Structures are given as structure tokens and as C-alpha cells.
Image: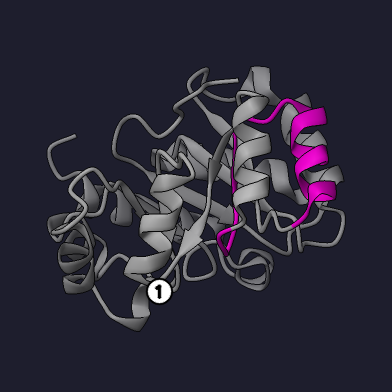
Amino acid sequence: MNSDPFARPGVLAIFRGFQPAEVGDVARLACEAGFRHIEVALNTPEARECLEALLAMRPELPPDLQLGAGTVRSHTDLDLAISLGLDFCLSPGLNPELLARARQQGLCFVPGILTPGEADRALLAGAALVKLFPASLHGPTYIRMLKEPMQELRVLVSGGVRAENARLFLEAGADFLAVGGSLFDPRRFRTVDRAEIRRAARDLMTRVFPNA
């Protein structure tokens, strides 16, 4: 397990609602667009099977790909991530018990926060990175305000990130971005030309990293 899979700025692809038979194609598309972090949300039916499918095809994907579980809310969820040897976990909320247990296992655990108080508690609990969710609630300027009194705070923003505002979040101080349904929507994947989805994914990555 990589102790800090989010050491460098990037964009996390959130897969929610995909079927095991199709998740590999979605992963290839994301990687072709430049994504190197993929999360499978555990509130997805057959989430375990999706993760196992991605792990099985890992030799076909970029060697620096980081694979993790999202919506980790219980010890059962954490057990799954540990047993599969995933690189990271994300949670929608702050659960110090899960964070402490993940750290003991050497697994990167990113708790969800919204308020300054939650951010401070996450730091005190040892979080190296927090997930600001939903980021769209207060917009990019909130990140700058949140980090002013806690300059050591590293923030991954999730919820409402799109190609049009992704760069604004980074300029406001976000350390990492997460993109889900606005780009990786199962219904869209099944009905829209995949070349169009690939172009949209590449457009987002180009806007985030224009000099890459």
C-alpha cells in the first residue's frame, strides 16, 4: 500500500453504479484521459466485484494507478479495503475510529469534513488529507478561508467539481480534486458515444493541468 497516494496534485475518478463487466472499460477510458486515481464507491451494488475486476486487470493499466474505495462508513467497509490491499479509502464523514484503524494498517484514509471544527478534529486525529464534501455548497473561496487558520490542512474537494470550475478550486488552495457523476455517469456511459466521454475527460484534465 502507498502511504501517501495523494502526494502530488491530481484528479480522482469516482465510479458509482457501474457493473463489474463494464468497469474495466471505464477505467481504461479514465486512464487514457490522464486519470491516475480511481475510487469505487462502496454504496454501488457489486462494489466488491467491481474492485476485484479492476485489481485483476491492474497489469493492463498504468503502473502508477492508485485504486481505492469510497463511501467507507463502517468497519465492514474498511475490512473490505484492507483485505483487497487497496491504496486508499475515502469517507463522506469524519470517523476517528476508522481513521485510526486504517492508519494502523498503513492504509491512507481520507475523512470527509465540511466545517472548520471537523477539519481541526481530522488533523488532530492524524489525517494527512481531508475530503471537503460537498464542495459546491460554499464554492472555491471557502477553501482559502478554511485553510487560513490551518495552513497544514490538505484538502481534496468533492461534490460539484466540473471542467468549468475545477481550476478555480485549485487556485483557491485545493490539493486534489474528485470528479464523479458529472463525468463518469453509468447511464451516460451506456448511451453516449464513448469517444465523446473521453473528450470530456481529457478536456477536464487539460483545464486542470494546462502545462502537462
| Residue 131 covered by magenta stretch | no
Relative to residue 115, is residue 51 depicted above or below? above
Percent of width and height locating residue 9:
29, 39
- Dot 1 surroundings within 10 Å: few (below 14), some, or many (20 or more)? some
Name the residue type under label 1. Answer: Gly
Give the residue displayed 77% in from the left and 55% down from the top: 74
Percent of width and height locating residue 73:
71, 58
Q: Is residue 20 left or right of residue 9?
A: right
Relative to residue 105, is residue 6 depicted above or below? below
Residue nearest the viewer, comparing 139 with 63: 139
Percent of width and height locating residue 54:
72, 34
Give the residue displayed 55% in from the left and 59% down from the top: 94
Relative to residue 209, is residue 93 depicted above or below? below
Give the residue displayed 60% in from the left and 68% down from the top: 185
Stretch of the chain drawn in magenta: 74-94
Quadrant, the C terminus: top left
Residue nearest the viewer, comparing 208 with 31: 208
